[in-house]
Image (cartoon, helix red, strand yellow):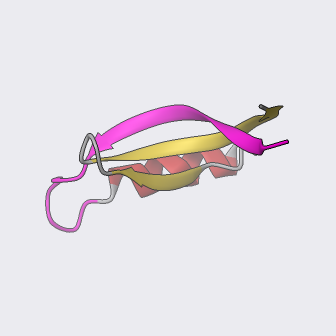
Amino acid sequence: MNRRVGRVVLGQFPAGGPRGSWPAEEFAHARRQEGQQAEVVMDLASDAFLVVVRGPESTE
């Protein structure tokens, strides 16, 4: 049995933002202040930062 943790994407931000700007981190920080366990991950396929929260576990 394989278990994987699903993720829900809350926001997507281009990787090529202005120097010194961290919009994905700022967005994730605001979500954490609201009580969500948001984290930033890099999606290499779309060259973007994603702000995600872990969804319910699913089994395959």
Q: Residue furthest bottom?
A: 20
Vertical comparison of 48 with 42: above or below? above
Front-most of 16 and 58? Answer: 58
Locate residue 4 relative to residue 15 in the image: left or right. right
Locate residue 12 relative to residue 54 in the image: left or right. left
Locate residue 43 relative to residue 15 in the image: left or right. right
Boundaries of the magenta span: 1-21
Front-most of 30 and 59? Answer: 59
Vertical comparison of 11 with 44: above or below? above
The quarter of the rendered structure image containing the C terminus is top right
Q: Position of residue 16 (x, y in %)?
A: 15, 53
Q: Residue at x 18, y 53 (%)?
A: 17
Front-most of 43 and 11? Answer: 43
Within the image, what quadrant is residue 54 found in? top right
Whether residue 4 is in magenta: the answer is: yes
Q: Residue furthest right?
A: 1
Within the image, what quadrant is residue 39 found in? bottom right
Q: Residue at x 31, y 42 (%)?
A: 13
The quarter of the rendered structure image containing the N terminus is top right
Front-most of 21 and 43? Answer: 43
Q: Residue at x 23, y 52 (%)?
A: 15
Q: Position of residue 35 (x, y in %)?
A: 76, 45
Locate residue 50 relative to residue 28 in the image: left or right. left
